[in-house]
Image (tube, rainbow, N blue to C red):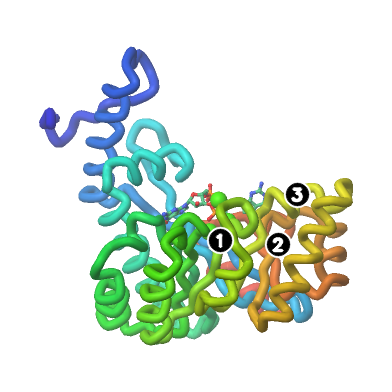
Amino acid sequence: AKNKGKQTYQVFNTEMKSDSLQRLTLENDLRRALSHNELMLYYQPQMDIETGDIVGFEALIRWLHPVRGLVPPNEFIPYAEESGLIVPIGEWVMQEACRQNKQWQDEGFLFVPVSVNLSTRQFLQHNLRDQVSEVLQRTGLAASYLELEITESSTMDVDFAIGVLLELKALGVKISIDDFGTGYSSLSYLKRFPIDKLKIDQSFVRDIMTDPNDAAIVASIISMTRHMNLRVIAEGVETEDQLVFLRNNHCNEIQGYWFSPPVSTFKVEELMLRIKQV
Ligand code: C2E
Ligand code: CA
Ligand code: CA
Ligand code: CA
């Protein structure tokens, strides 16, 4: 790899003729981001639909790029996955999310789980269980306050996935299936997975008020999860109408702009204080 001086940053996107060069630059930039603490976590609260309480936070990565500013994950996670950098990045995310959650607990803020996204590549790591266990030990966070979000694509090899999930569950962490409904999903396997929660993908939630098919899909997923004794959260809830629909259909939790977008730790603390005082 080309070794740039510590202070020079290449701006990708502009004047880059070839895709592969751009990818290489991005990869180098991302490597530097990891070692120079340019990555940060935003947190999006999850609300109990009945009580209005905050019942969790999802940690969502951001890259504070020295030239480009705040870069959203969709612009670099795919490259991180391709290059394998997602593994050290994912470890950093888990460590930081657990550290922060423990700090919030120590400071007397909320005791609620933090959700961390696990890419398939991380899920397939042979020592995932040990990694998770070490992070919990290092940070002192109780296992029940960590939730791991996996996608259906991590569960292609059903027996392997069940094995990993059982190991993780034995540690005491919670598991949810992210973007539910968008991937490969076989309902007959779903019931064999030792999971706690389904997250209904925002693409179904978006049009529940206007598209009867989406409304039916969302209502069925909720009813199915209730029968399976799983919790269910709807993602991408942006309007009061959607909230009311979901409440009438007995969805447990919501996450989305209606309640709060993902925000910095500073804003999360403000939000928690405000809710405490109500
Ligand atoms: P995701 O896991 O499905 O996360 C939810 C995404 O929906 C977030 O985008 C969030 O900002 C956005 N969102 C939340 N509420 C609403 C809403 O009401 N309306 C709309 N339109 N969008 C909403 P974000 O933060 O840009 O993250 C995008 C994706 O990047 C995530 O999708 C996840 O797949 C990936 N990602 C984020 N952080 C990490 C990470 O630490 N590790 C891994 N492997 N992937 C991550
Ligand atoms: Ca997620
Ligand atoms: Ca999702
Ligand atoms: Ca997604």
Residue 46 drawn at (x, y percent): 63, 69
| Residue 87 visible within the image | yes
Q: Under 8 Å from ligand 1: the CB of mark 2?
A: no
Q: Under 8 Å from ligand 1: the CB of mark 3?
A: yes
Residue 124 drawn at (x, y percent): 32, 61
At x 61%, y 70%, the residue is: 188
In terms of sequence position, does the residue under pointer 1 or pointer 2 come before the other? 1
Q: Where, quadrant-wise, is the C terminus in this rendering?
A: bottom right
Mark whose residue sits in front, 2 or 3: 3
At x 23%, y 43%, the residue is: 31
Q: What residue type is labelled 2?
A: Phe
Label 1: which residue? 178
Q: Is residue 250 left or right of residue 198?
A: right
Which label sits on residue 259?
Answer: 2
The crowd level at tag 2 (other Cα within 10 Å; few <14, some 14-19, many 20+) is many
Q: Under 8 Å from ligand 2: the CB of mark 1?
A: yes
Number of marks in picture = 3
